[in-house]
Amino acid sequence: MAKNKLILKKYHIRRYKFSDYDEVLNAFFKFQKKADIKTASINFSAIKNRSQKQKELEKFFSSFVKPSDIQYVSVDEELNKIVCFHCFSLVKGGCDFKFVFKNPEYALSSVAIESVRKTMHLFKKKYGPSKMQSYLYKRNNYEKYINFTKKYFNAKECYSNDEFVKVEYEL
C-alpha cells in the first residue's frame, strides 16, 4: 500500500447530497491528475494554466454527472470523509454505471473495492436494471484498469474503439 494514504476500515453508503459537491469535486481533481482520463473532447494534460485546468475539469465532471443521475457516496465512518463517488443513469433496458472514482487520499483496499460492489448491488436491488454497463475511457495504466474491472467487478468486454471500452457487469 502507498505510504501516507488513508486506510478505509468501516464505511457506510448514502445518496450523494448537493452539500457534497466541493468535497467530491476536490477528490475528482486529485483523481484526474493521477488517472489522466482521455476523451475526444479535451486533453487535460495539455492545459498548463491551473485555473483553466480546474474550470475544464469542473465542466468535464459536470458533463458526466447530471441532476437526473442517481449518485451515491461511500463515506469513511472514522473520518466522515467521502471515499468513493458512484454515478448511475437508468437507460432503456438497463443502467449506465457512468462514473466511479476513489478519493486518491485513500489506499486501494479490499474494503474500498467492497464499497463499490455493495453500491452496485444496492442500486440493482433498488432500481432493478436487467443489466449494468460502463464506458471505460482511456487513461493512465489503461490495460491494468480494464483487467481490474474484470477481476473485481465481473466486467465483460462487449465493445471497444480508440476512445473507450464498453463493459457489462454480471451482478
Image (cartoon, helix red, strand yellow):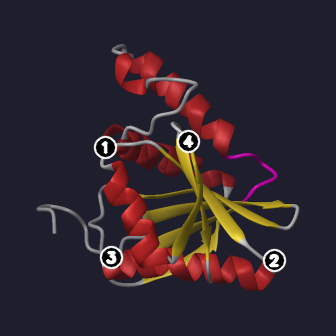
- The amino acid on which the numbered mark 3 sits, given as a three-letter code, is Leu
| Mark positioned earlier in the residue sequence (1 or 4) | 1
Residue position marked by numbered label 2 in the rendering: 127
Please name whichever residue, 152 or 85, is drawn nearer the observer in this view of the structure: 152
Residue position marked by numbered label 4 in the rendering: 161
75 part of magenta stretch: no
Residue position marked by numbered label 3 in the rendering: 8
Q: How many marks?
A: 4
- The amino acid on which the numbered mark 4 sits, given as a three-letter code, is Asn
Q: Nearer the viewer, mark 3 or mark 4?
A: 4
| Mark positioned earlier in the residue sequence (2 or 1) | 1
Q: Nearer the viewer, mark 1 or mark 4?
A: 4
Compared to 155, does 101 lie above or below?
A: above
Give the CA distance from mark 2 to mark 4.
30 Å
Give the CA distance from mark 1 to mark 4.
23 Å
Q: Secondary structure at mark 2?
A: helix
Q: Secondary structure at mark 3?
A: loop
Please name whichever residue, 8 or 114, is drawn nearer the observer in this view of the structure: 114
- The amino acid on which the numbered mark 2 sits, given as a three-letter code, is Tyr
Q: Which quarter shows the N terminus?
A: bottom left
Give the CA distance from mark 1 to mark 3.
20 Å
- The amino acid on which the numbered mark 1 sits, given as a three-letter code, is Lys
